Image: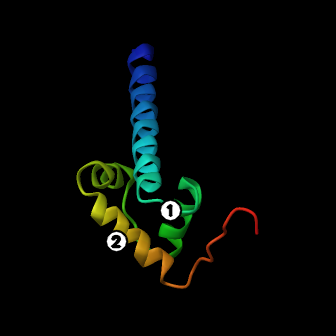
Amino acid sequence: MVSADRDRHKQKRNFRGLWITRINAGIREIKLFYSYSKWIHDLYKRQLLINRKMLSQMAILHSQCLSMISNEITYSGLIEMEFPGE
């Protein structure tokens, strides 16, 4: 019984890590200039509440949707782009 609970929680942790990796790869593919954690934070600031599983699916199957979401965040005036060397 204990191992079933432990493994169920481990599986959830593994899937969350997989989703984060996929989202991060999708963000890097569309050449955004900020990290995954800042991107997620800006999503919540903009009140675009999409869970990581759905964002992961968008990153894999519909990268243009991920790009549209990123444009919404970027051009909303909520963030300032930080470029290396400035």
Q: Residue furthest bottom?
A: 77
Crowd around label 2: few <14 · some 14–19 · many ≥20 (10 Å)? few
- The quarter in which the C terminus is drawn is bottom right
Question: Considering depth in this image, is 67 or 23 the residue closer to the camera?
Answer: 67
At label 2, the amino acid type is Met
Q: Quadrant of the N terminus?
A: top left
Q: Which residue is mark 1?
A: 32
How much space separates mark 2 and mark 1, taking CA atoms? 12 Å
Q: Secondary structure at mark 2?
A: helix
Residue at image x 34%, y 71%? 68
Quadrant of the rendered image containing residue 2: top left
Residue for badge 2: 68
Rendering coords of residue 14 (x, y %): 43, 31
Q: Earlier in the sequence, mark 2 or mark 1?
A: 1
For label 1, the crowd category at 10 Å Cα-Cα, with few meaning under 14, some 14 to 19 and many 20 or more, is: some
Residue sticking out furthest to the left? 61
Q: Position of residue 71 (x, y in %)?
A: 42, 75
Q: Residue at left 29%, top 48%?
A: 60
Which of these two is toward me, 6 or 28? 28
Residue lying furthest front in this view?
A: 85
